[in-house]
Structures are given as structure tokens and as C-alpha cells.
Amino acid sequence: MNAPRTVAPLPADAPADCNGAIIRFVDVYKRFGPLPVLQGVNLDIPADQTTVVIGPSGVGKSVLLKHIVGLLRPDAGEIFFHGRRIDHLGERALEAIRKRIGFLFQLGALFDSMTVFDNVAFPLREQSDKSEEEIRRVVRESLAVIGLSGTELKMPADLSGGQRKRIALARAIAMHPEVVLYDEPTTGLDPIRADIINELILKLKRDLKVTGIVVTHDMTSALKVADQIVMLLDGKIVFRGTAQQLRCCPEERVQRFIQGRASPEELRALHQN
Ligand SMILES: Nc1ncnc2c1ncn2[C@@H]1O[C@H](COP(=O)(O)OP(=O)(O)O)[C@@H](O)[C@H]1O
Ligand SMILES: [Mg+2]
């Protein structure tokens, strides 16, 4: 029989064992005044995979993403990155984390008065000590990855909505992030342009080993890019599993959402008014 192993006490800031998860939410609560949004979120994001977060508008999906980069802080609960607690870090320490996490915001958010080149170069100039020559090389590589080489001198207004989202993605990947947060990356795009974004999400995972978190209501996109799907409803994660398991999930609210069916109460309210 083996002798019992003596275990040294962990130092106060030792990484927690997150069981392979690169990001972990533990019992996270967040409210805005009287409005409860996150009400006990527990979630593991596995490394090198794509997790898709689905759920109705206004449920707190963007709020969830903003907690990962410290743009919002939980009222209670803990958030871990690589096993280290990050929800109580100061701005300086958060900056180091933000460099490792690219954020593709819901509305794309390019600087309209800057060229494509300056938009993609922006984080490199602000947050790295790369020379202008290195920056030119990284911008060129990032534009090649997203399939828009040669657009350096264009202005955002000269591009389509889909191209603008891809430039925003080039700006995120220019920092070589480990994690990319995609907030509704296909919303407002036609199905073909949406599919180019889906292919890019798959490509970044495959070629650059990016861990992706994709917030979407686009079920076609969710089913194409997800390794795991989670559903946020009433402030909690009510489902976590593969696309196949989602299809078989017996919960009525989950099935209504994925099939795009309003509830009988919602329909009654519509016909009364
Ligand atoms: N900074 C904020 N201040 C007050 N309320 C907010 C803030 N951010 C989000 N909310 C509210 O929190 C709820 C969830 O928002 P959000 O995460 O943007 O929803 P979605 O799931 O559509 O992304 C909404 O009711 C929204 O109005
Ligand atoms: Mg949102």
C-alpha cells in the first residue's frame, strides 16, 4: 500500500486546479441597480476549443464576456484565467491579461477616421514596444489571415459590414491572443458573409490554437463552430454540451430557443394587444 502523500499548503496566489479550463466562472453574480443579470454563473471554458454562448437578447451574454477582461466586475463569485483569480485585479494587472485576450465587440467598432492599416496597428502601437517595421509586418500577416491583404490604405467607410468585422478581427489577432471573444460576429451579415466569419473562427482555432468564446443567436453559426455550446437563461447556465446533446436536450425553453418558437404566453400577449 502506498504511504499517504504529504501535501504542502498552497501559497495564497497559487493557481487553482481548473481541470483544463483556461477560464472558469464560479458562482458569479452581477446586477445593475434593481436588474439582476448574472445569478450564479458556473462555467468552464476549455483551452484550444470554441465555446458558443447562446441565449435570448438582453439575457447577459455581452455582460458575461466583459467580465473576462475586467470591463465589468462581479458583485459576488470568482473568475479565473489559467487558474489565477482575475476578478479582483487592479487595472495594471488587467492590462497584461487583456493583451492575451482579443475582443471582437458586438458593433465591430473600427475607428472611422483611420485607415485599415492604422486600425490594425493601433493595439500594437499602444500596447507593445514593436518597431514600425515589425508593426508593418504583423499588420500584413494579420490581414493575410483574414483574407483582406492589400486593403491597408482603405477607410472603414469603403468596406462592407462583413469586411469591417474581419478587419476588427485582424486587429484582435495582431496581438497573438490565446483567447478571442467574439460578440455576435455574424449578426447583420448575409449568410455567405456570415459563413466567411464562421470559417475564420475555425481557422484561428486550427492554425493559431485560439480558444474561442462566441456569443451568438445565429444557430447555423453556433452549430458550425462550436465544440461546446452553453445556454444562458435567467442569469444561469441552463445547458452545456455538444450540438448533438443540445438537439436532444429535453428542456422546453432550450428547444423553443433553438427552433425559434415563441412561448404560448408570449403569443397570447401578442394577440391580446
Ligand atoms: N453597463 C450597464 N449598465 C446598466 N445595465 C446594463 C449594462 N450593461 C448591460 N446592462 C443590462 O444588462 C442586461 C444584459 O445585457 P447584455 O449582456 O448586453 O445582453 P445580451 O445577452 O443581449 O448581450 C440588459 O438588460 C442590459 O440593458
Ligand atoms: Mg450582447
Image (cartoon, helix red, strand yellow):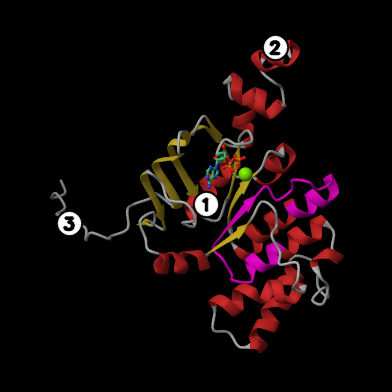
Quadrant of the frame with the C terminus: top right
- The residue carrying mark 2 is 268
- The residue carrying mark 1 is 66
Task: Estimate the x, y position of residue 151 in percent, counting from the top left.
Answer: 82, 73
Side (left or right) of 177 relative to 80: right
Side (left or right) of 196 relative to 28: right
Camera-nearest label, 1 or 3: 1
Residue for point 85% across, 58% down? 160
Residue at disc 1, secondary structure: helix
Give the mark, 1 or 3, whose residue is nearer the N terminus.
3
- Mark 1, ligand 1, within 8 Å: the answer is yes
Task: Estimate the x, y position of residue 178 in percent, counting from the top left.
Answer: 54, 63
Give the mark, 1 or 2, whose residue is nearer the N terminus.
1
What amino acid is found at the position of numbered circle 2 in the picture?
A: Arg
What amino acid is found at the position of numbered circle 3 in the picture?
A: Pro
Residue for point 34% across, 52% down? 17
What amino acid is found at the position of numbered circle 1 in the picture?
A: Lys
Question: Do the numbered discs 2 and 3 sit on residues whose CB atoms are within 8 Å?
Answer: no
Q: Which residues are magenta?
A: 168-197
Task: Estimate the x, y position of residue 140 in percent, counting from the top left.
Answer: 74, 77
Residue at disc 3, secondary structure: loop
Question: Do the numbered discs 1 and 2 sit on residues whose CB atoms are within 8 Å?
Answer: no
Task: Estimate the x, y position of residue 161 in percent, counting from the top left.
Answer: 81, 56
Residue for point 67% across, 76% down? 121
- The residue carrying mark 3 is 9
